[in-house]
Image (spheres, grey):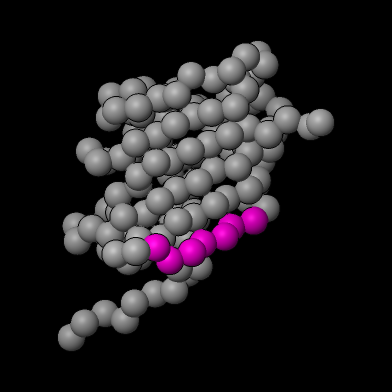
Amino acid sequence: MEMEKSSPLFVAQEFVRQYYSLLNNAPDVLHGSNSSYVHGGLDTNGNLAEPVNGQAGIHEKIVSLSECHTKIRHVDAHAMLNNGVVVQVLGELSNSGQPMRKFMQTFVLAPEVSIFMHHLRHYTTFINVVILFLTEQ
């Protein structure tokens, strides 16, 4: 019996719930061998942040985000070719006790058969994960 396909928004909302919970509680399990990650915008000192790519770089960057707390303001999702889902998240993020900063993060979830997150068994590889911190103008 084949499992019914979930809507892109359901997949996105469940992914976001689990991703940001893991970011706070277990950041070292957030990426896989096929993941890429770009952390852009400005760092906490106001300097342009360097992109992070590759599994080792992604792991190092994500585990450096200690005590992450997020307030998600909006989640949007759209279906892509080959059953992928693009997810865009807007919210606020605090790292290591710093003040909350507005951010926008985009994920492309690629279909995969193996299980990584319980409800997302078919959407487990993140591709082109991009996070931008937004500044007030």
Q: Nearer the viewer, residue 84 or 1?
A: 84
| Residue 104 seen | yes
Using residue 23 as the reference point, say whether residue 134 is left or right of it: right
| Residue 14 seen | no
The answer to which quarter of the image holds residue 104 is top right
Residue 94 on image: x %, y %: 63, 32
Farthest residue in the front direction? Answer: 81
Numbered range of the magenta stretch? 74-80
Residue 130 on image: x %, y %: 48, 38
Q: Nearer the viewer, residue 109 or 70?
A: 109
Residue 66 on image: x %, y %: 50, 27
Whether residue 127 is in magenta: the answer is no
Residue 17 on image: x %, y %: 50, 55
When the figure is inspected, residue 18 is found, relative to residue 77, above or below; the finding is above
Farthest residue in the bottom direction? Answer: 1
Q: Residue at x 59, y 18 (%)?
A: 48
Q: Residue at x 40, y 51 (%)?
A: 108
Q: Residue at x 66, y 24 (%)?
A: 98
Look at the magenta stretch and give its main secondary structure. Answer: strand
Q: Residue at x 54, y 43 (%)?
A: 105
The answer to which quarter of the image holds residue 5 is bottom left
Q: Nearer the viewer, residue 84 or 123?
A: 84
Whether residue 75 is in magenta: the answer is yes
Q: Quadrant of the C terminus?
A: top right
Farthest residue in the right direction? Answer: 137
